[in-house]
Image (spheres, coloured by chain):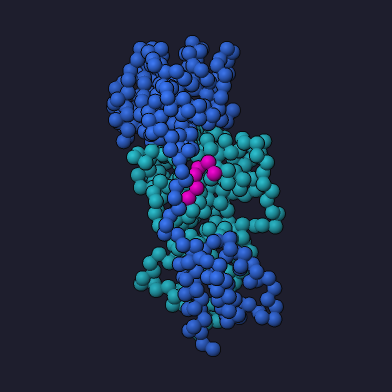
Chain colours: A blue, B cyan
Amino acid sequence: MIDPAALARVRIVLCETSHPGNIGASARAMKTMGLSRLVLVRPRLFPYADADARASGAVDVLHSATCCESLDEALTGTTFVCALSARRRDLTPPAIDVRNAARELVQHALSAEAAVVFGPERVGLSIEDVSRCHKLVRIAANPEYPSLNLAAAVQIVAYELRCAWEADEPAEPQGTDVHPAVHEEVERLVLHLEQSMLATGFLDPARPGRLIQRMRRLIARARPESEEVAILRGFLHSVVSDRKP
Amino acid sequence: MIDPAALARVRIVLCETSHPGNIGASARAMKTMGLSRLVLVRPRLFPYADADARASGAVDVLHSATCCESLDEALTGTTFVCALSARRRDLTPPAIDVRNAARELVQHALSAEAAVVFGPERVGLSIEDVSRCHKLVRIAANPEYPSLNLAAAVQIVAYELRCAWEADEPAEPQGTDVHPAVHEEVERLVLHLEQSMLATGFLDPARPGRLIQRMRRLIARARPESEEVAILRGFLHSVVSDRKP
């Protein structure tokens, strides 16, 4: 398990957001992934009812957001900063995809403060803002319509941060209530199926073809549980037992 | 580059969506990642102005959405279906994380139709709906607040689909003689099995329990081929047809 405080050291900075609903939805996107530090640079409308509505159960993240007058103020104390930008321009920091950026951010946040900066909805970050950042983050997108909603972009970044953060966690233990059928149970099922197919006349013993082989393959693919084998055999029993000879 | 048509073969199915804004935002999320086939099962309000507003530049995807009366109708023609669900319940298909699900979906969509199914905003998918799917997809999330907005979940799934599609992995060659059964064939098999279980007296109509649900889950896990479905139905026909009343 990676340091649980690491995600709390990655702040999400939204610059000059126009729509308060996007701020609320961003807070929700953050909280679903375990992020908590939201910083707003000159939001057009904040606080605002629509922000609260879209935040849903993440109003705590929203209401503890910090408001700043400048990006510099928002980045105080950080030592690694990524900027989201879809635009390709000259003189930008090196570009990196969001998955690799998330890994770098989480690694960095083990011991220091980091930030991801998002620009205004329509125009994106200014070249001056981008130049304050260490890496330019690109999200894979449809080149014909790469226009992600602001909160949707925050959601993807937060999701990749959580994936990077969870990467070292031990795998989730398997459910203990699953009992795969053992080999001999499966074999008895195949035999029971064959006998039933003979009893109903579906399988002609003179011309068996590859029918049972096919059934065996299908059952193997299904990897049945013990209980499922028992159900199927119960059904097969009912097929044969009360047949009139 | 993987087959450019593959993304078009993955349909996004939204079941009983309450808020039309979420439908519009989902259409936008899809288009930003190159997805185009949106299917709506009994949306509460559609078409609707708020859906168009939130779709932004993706009104083409929104307006070409198909409306269906049932999930079965929505899944017609598909051979691989994933369901989004945060809830842990008994008797579900095997769970898989969204990254691996996206790889499977894209691989599958190279040669066949696939779908990802999302439930209503508050309650999620019913167990009956989930049991129609082959895999349960989990998105990494904060266990204390895993409540992603619907369109945000669509955005993450669409993003992972695009990442999988853009990845330079060579496609695993599909066997040319394998013909997975389409959704409606599987449904007819489930119905036929139920009728047969009733006919033999194995299934008590007064106390059906979760028998059919269990059978549906087993069959989904087996991913039967068309010919296997035909064989099983032939056997079931033989079980019932020559029974003495």
Viewer can see residue A223: yes
Q: Quadrant of residue B7?
A: top right
Residue at the spot 38% in from the left edge and 67% down from the top edge: B209
Position of residue A4 measured from the top left corner of the image (x, y, whole percent): 38, 33
Furthest toward the top, the residue is: A128
Q: How many marks?
A: 0
Considering only vertical position in the picture, is A207 above or below A52? below
Residue at the spot 58% in from the left edge and 46% down from the top edge: B104
Residue at the spot 50% in from the left edge and 42% down from the top edge: B98
* Foreground residue among B222 and A177: A177
* Foreground residue among B237 and A107: A107
Residue at the spot 65% in from the left edge and 71% down from the top edge: A211
* Foreground residue among B184 and B159: B159
Position of residue A26 measured from the top left corner of the image (x, y, whole percent): 39, 29
Viewer can see residue B39: no
Horizontal side, residue A128 vs residue A63: left or right:
right
Q: Quadrant of residue B201?
A: bottom left
Quarter of the image with the N terminus of chain A in it = top left
Horizontal side, residue A222 vs residue B15: left or right:
right
Considering only vertical position in the picture, is B196 above or below B42? below
Quarter of the image with the C terminus of chain A in it = bottom right
Position of residue A58 measured from the top left corner of the image (x, y, whole percent): 32, 33
Considering only vertical position in the picture, is B132 above or below A232? above
Q: Which residues are magenta?
A: B95-100
Examine the structure image and report whether residue B194 is included in the region drawn in magenta: no
Position of residue B227 measured from the top left corner of the image (x, y, whole percent): 63, 64
